[in-house]
Amino acid sequence: MLIDVHAHFLHARTPRADWRERNASRLRAGDRVGITFHVSSVLGSWGLTSPIYFPSPADVEEANQVQRDLEREHPDRIRGYITVNPNYTTHAAAEIARGAVAGMIGVKLAASRRADDPLLDPVCAAAGERGLPILQHIWQHRRRDFPGQEASDAAELCALARRHPTVSFILAHIGGGGDWLHSLAVVRRVPNVYVDLSGSGVDGGMLEACLAAVGAERLLWGCDLTIDTGWAKLRYLEHLLVPADLELVRWRNAARIFPPRAFEIA
Amino acid sequence: MITDVNAFVGGYPWRRVPGTAPRDLLQAMDRTGIGEAWISHLPGIFWRDPSEGNAWLLDTARDERRFRPVPAVHPGLAGWEEIVLRAVDAGAPAVRADPTFYGIDPAGTAMRRLVGVAGEAGIALLLAVRLEDGRQRHPNDRAEELPAAAVRALVRADQRARILVTHADRSFIDEVHFGSTPDEAARIWWDISWVWGPPEDHLETLLSTVGAARFVFGTGQPLRLPETAVARLDLLDLPGSTRAAIETGNTRMLAP
């Protein structure tokens, strides 16, 4: 079993004319690598009618519907996060309720609001009530603001995680850019934060540092935008880890934090 | 056999990197099926005179048949022409220059003269766009990335120039390749260390638009996991001859 905890799919109402090819490529490459489940999210209209990281309520609804349609189309290999924009608090709660009823297995927080902001508390509470983990987009050591997103870093995520100790949080793409050493130092003592290994970064020493910081028990395998780098990290982990620990990273940790039977095929 | 044209030995000043000793590099090569590595002296890139690392580099390569040295040349320092000629005598496949790390104009007079002398001597010039992702670099690690405009300018500086560019992404390669004449573009080779695979499929796209003859296998190890370049090729359905060309055959045109 191999679970990619950080995947995305595109759809027709985005700026990408090649959305079908990209979706097909993800599934094809996933088959090659041996990915059993892609746990994915759709970030609104990916910029067509509202910003990627600040999706409008209408775009959020459509994206979550697209995600559910993909799950119905591929029940044996796609699972979904409910994307929300916490600036629309009531709407976010309603989307979580609707998504959970429809079988979605986690919540995706991108970069619409800083992770330590009180506006995220009701989102976390709603996720926690339903046993859904939260995947939080992270800029590893954000030293300034960047256009187009209100990015958070590990310190801000951990502040949120401490306020919601029964909720599992996934620190997104440790290899996705920025100073991963900064993030690892922060998450070390926050046991309900898991580290997602996705991202295009394949730095020598990064995986060793992840293991030193949180151990195999809190690492989750993923790809995000680059399946090639995900596969490379998996291959390297095969040399670093004993088989039992490799299984934790490949899927067992994910199976533990997502809802029970999330990865059973009906 | 796979030839890695983009490997380093020696420590990195900006963070702890495991596996920088020659024996570690050999182990990583064994792990990933890489037969030969073109090695650069990593710490020297940051020295005032990067060629001070060349003696150790040449000794290291002399002691290990799987290594081929890529000596560093700072064309702003007196006597650099001798270093190019010594590299040729030592059987080096290329010399490297990292102008933004040296603090010189990457397309300025000194670099253009280096292109001419290397072209005259029949040795390729290796240029790296970057060493690490710009978003994670140490706050004091401030050298600019190599601009695409510099590569276009340098390949035009001498018709004999052969240039190997490492750590370039798809947009950089597109810009230089289609911003050059066919003759110029045919004298540039790109390593695959920074070109994304699926689902964006940048490498697959480039192989069909720019052509497989322009690409060589490179990893950037040990700063980056060498498994990445191998996985990238494994994710493509390439004919065996094309894969072999990227893995090593194309280097014979780059460094006959």
Image (cartoon, coloured by chain):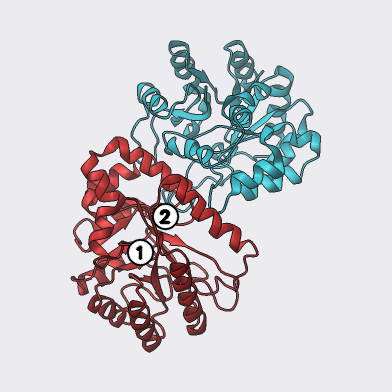
Amino acid type assigned to the residue bearing label 1 in the image: Asp
Judge by depth and name the residue closer to the eye, A65 or B200. A65
Q: Which chain is red?
A: A
* Residue placed under numbered mark 1 in the picture: A153
Crowd around label 2: few <14 · some 14–19 · many ≥20 (10 Å): many
Q: Is residue B195 visible?
A: yes
Question: Are discs 1 and 2 less than 8 Å apart at CB?
Answer: yes
- The chain carrying label 2 is A
Counting from the top left corner in percent of width and height, residue A239 is at 30, 35
Residue A240 to residue A80: above or below: above
* Residue placed under numbered mark 2 in the picture: A178
Q: Which chain is cyan?
A: B
Residue B109 to residue A137: above or below: above
Crowd around label 1: few <14 · some 14–19 · many ≥20 (10 Å): many
Counting residues from the start of the chain, the first of labels 1 and 2 encountered is: 1
Judge by depth and name the residue closer to the eye, B29 or B1. B1
Alpha carbon of mark 1 to alpha carbon of mark 2: how far? 10 Å
Helix, strand or loop at mark 1? loop
At a point 42% along the width and 79% down the height, the residue shown is: A85
Q: Quadrant of the C terminus of chain B?
A: top right
Residue B106 occupies which quadrant of the picture?
top right
Counting from the top left corner in percent of width and height, residue A260 is at 24, 66
Helix, strand or loop at mark 2? loop
Amino acid type assigned to the residue bearing label 2 in the image: Gly
